[in-house]
Amino acid sequence: MKGQQLFDHQKLDINLAELKSHGLKFEIVIDPDLAIDYKQGKEVDIVDVLKSEEIFIDAQKGNLAGEAELLKVFQTTEPLKIAKVIIEKGDIQLTADFREKVRTEKRNKIITMIHRNAMDPKTGLPHPPQRIENAFSEAKIHIDEFKKAEDQVEEIVKKLTLILPIRFAMKTIQVHIPGEFATKLYGRIQNFGKIKSENWENDGSWLAEVEIPAGLQNEFFDELNKETHGNMESKILD
């Protein structure tokens, strides 16, 4: 089905990716989970991301973009090529229900991570999940639906420590990453913890010692191995 016919029955419940350019707005209708994965660089087929291979000026009204408009902005009328540009350079517009679902899932995951991996330094015991959840509310913690839960833990813990004493058991890990992956992974590694030392070698590879919460160790290795396809070296130092 095309345009208006396709979305008449769900006008108020569609997730979109949107790009504004040349005074125009272009929209595509997306699977929100896959669109977020695609935007974060995961291996997702653009065909699976799209609910419809059509480019809209206004998806809620079913108004399709014209060929002249598409050629002016994208230099093509091929929907898959255009969809990639819209997702990569544009914004993902999620329904309120889906935003709340994602935030709740990530909030619960972060609370579980803190409960399992941190302790009350006064007692040496883990904080109960309900106590952590109460601190979330008191500190007015905002969950970013577009960022991985692991990437938000450090900043959230900083805010929580103003209300709740928290200490993570820490691990220092040495990583040696080839130059073709090092620049891309640098920021992600920073999100996991603190870079204690680093050295950029002549071949472009990166040797570093990184201190991360012990409970994030598996996620840390999974992330690096996935992005480098296992082409890296690592060693736990303590």
Image: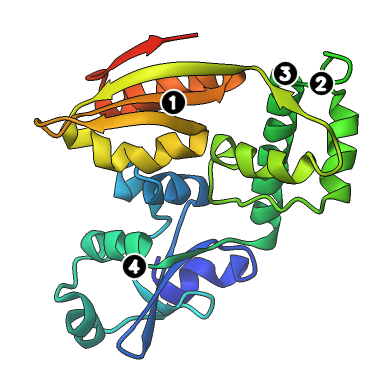
**Total marks in image:** 4
Circle 1 is placed at which residue position? Answer: 210
The answer for how far apart the CA atoms under marks 4 and 1 are is 45 Å
Label 3 vs 1, first from the N-terminus: 3
Circle 3 is placed at which residue position? Answer: 116
User: Residue 187 location in percent, x, y?
Assistant: 39, 43
Residue for point 84% across, 14% down? 125
Residue 43 visible to an observer of this rendering: no
- Mark 4, Cα crowd under 10 Å, few <14 / some 14-19 / many 20+, is many
User: Residue 67 location in percent, x, y?
Assistant: 21, 82
Residue for point 25% across, 65% down? 79
Residue 154 marker: none
Do callouts 2 and 1 mark residues in contact (Cβ within 8 Å)?
Answer: no
The answer for how far apart the CA atoms under marks 3 and 4 are is 45 Å
Residue 54 marker: 4
Mark closer to the observer (2, 4): 2
Task: Say which amino acid is labelled 2.
Answer: Pro
Do callouts 4 and 1 mark residues in contact (Cβ within 8 Å)?
Answer: no
Circle 2 is placed at which residue position? Answer: 121
